[in-house]
Image (cartoon, rainbow, N blue to C red):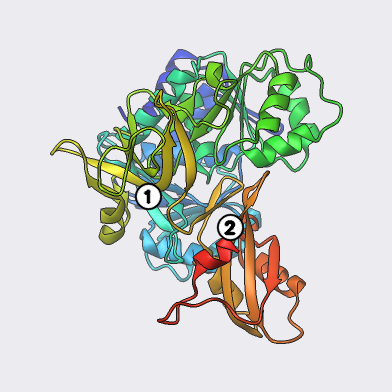
Amino acid sequence: MRVESFLAESARRFPGKTALVAGPQRLTYAELGAHSAALAAELRRLGVTRGERVVIFLHNSPEAVISVFGTLLAGGVFSVINPGTKADKLVYILNHCTARALITEPRLAEVAAAAASRASSVAATLITPFSFPDAAAPPDPGIDLDLAMVIYTSGSTGFPKGVMMTHANIVAAATSITTYLESRADDVVLSVLPLAFDYGLYQALMCAKVGATLVLEKSFTYPAVVLEKLKSEHVTGFPLVPTLAAMLLQMKHLRPDMFPELRYITNTAAALPRAHIERLRALFPGAKLFSMYGLTECKRCTYLPPEQLALRPESVGVAIPGTEAYVVNERGERAAPGEVGELVIRGAHVMKGYWADEEGTARVLKSGPYPWERVLYTGDLFRTDDEGYLYFVSRKDDIIKTRGEKVSPKEVENVIYELAGVREVAVIGVPDPILGQAIKAIVVGEDGLTERDIIRHCAARLEEFMVPSLVEFRGELPKSENGKIVRKELIAA
């Protein structure tokens, strides 16, 4: 099965049903299918052939969802990029995956054009809104072993890594998640998560898979508007990250009887504080709360069955259906209960590797229990309890996880180093009850350099979630004998 078959089957079964709500726009499954097929035909006309990459540089919108399915129907490989991405990073991505086409919108057209002009592989740039005549989808898009998407995530080198996911990978992940969520055609899912974030992207894919309705919002900037959508659209599913949950719980007028149709709430990116869990359960008594853990390289790893939440609120649960998750100690053996080790994931949802990075791929995809497979070493430290439930301990590497996004300290440091007066800098993550981790920049600089200078410079060059919220100035940074900054000492301080 290929991913675009999700849409084709739902359009066949529910042609007149609302598939997508985005602001004032509403599309039925028949309309979403027709628009996607028309875009697929246009991409093929522009020279996009089977396996070629199409970068989607859009805010949350109907066109973004159409672009995903249109690319797949054309036999292409999509890559959704955060609309806050600056030109230099977009140039890197376009060149790295040798994108054939770039899809964007008028307010991002200047950044997109600047990037495309420096990417020789880009043969066409499409700007929404689309105005293509209806057309049948091109024939023979490929098979389920073909690549479906390259999703970019921060890497420890300071450059984003392209995670390669096949159609079979995505179908396996979507099938597993919709199984434990008990997703169904009469669900209405409200998502404020960016489609560039795989948690947000899968809301669109999973809704299409089961024939549900997706209510797509651009952000949680106006919580009152989102809450009104929960009521007016009769929402049954609400995916959150801890930052959004904290904002939601700050709203004073919420009452337990306001959203009787809400069936489930999901959370991932970082564990919810126990106090937030208790308040969410009190405010949404009819909704099941799913605590989950995942990473881009396999989409989802674990989930905690809602009935276990009161018993072990700090656990991220057990392996999602059809997969296996276990902890390996430093000796390469399966760890005993309570023993800390690295989490390993087996399953059909594990990525094929990093685009154009065999060395990086070899570091995380290793031989598994059987000779025919490679398993994913997550780089995260976990332990289990006596009953096999998993608990996150810490990250093995330096990647910072904030607001549901992964941030490379090196990437932020590179930008700060561009600022006149900066001599040395180290970026670390510090615990934060809402963000999971807050980004802190520790700077050695010339007199007169201020916290405002650092933050303003970063805001002009980086996506919002990558901008440090804390800045500390020091006279020097701790270093090893070979002159390298010892980040661990800063984190432990």
Identify the residue at horizontal 40%, vertical 81% (top origin). 482
Name which of mark 2 and mark 1 comes first in the sequence. Answer: 1
Q: Position of residue 326 (x, y in %)?
A: 33, 35
Local SS, label 1: strand
Identify the residue at horizontal 57%, vertical 45% (top origin). 404
Quick check: 121 above or below 25? below
Question: Would residue 268 appear left or right of 377 to someone viewing this image?
Answer: right
Q: Residue 222: which numbered mark, if any?
A: none
Local SS, label 2: strand
Identify the residue at horizontal 47%, vertical 31% (top origin). 205
Instruction: State the residue lying farthest toward the right.
Output: 253
Question: Would residue 450 appear left or right of 290 to someone viewing this image?
Answer: right
Three-letter amino acid code at disc 2? Gly
Q: Position of residue 359 (x, y in %)?
A: 27, 61
Packing grade of label 1 (10 A; few <14, some 14-19, many >=20) is many
Q: Position of residue 309 (x, y in %)?
A: 57, 22
Q: Are marks 2 and 1 in contact (CB under 8 Å)?
A: no
Q: Nearer the viewer, residue 204 or 420?
A: 420
Instruction: State the residue lying farthest toward the left.
Output: 371
Three-letter amino acid code at disc 1? Val
Q: Position of residue 374 (x, y in %)?
A: 22, 42
Q: Residue 163: which numbered mark, if any?
A: 1
* Residue 457, picture quadrant: bottom right
| Residue 106 visible to the viewer | yes
Quick check: 447 above or below 340? below
* Residue 149, picture quadrant: top left
Quadrant where the N terminus lies? Answer: top left
Q: Which residue is mark 2?
A: 429
User: Which of the two discs, 2 and 1, sits closer to the camera?
Assistant: 2
Q: Nearer the viewer, residue 23 or 371?
A: 371
Quick check: 172 above or below 236? below
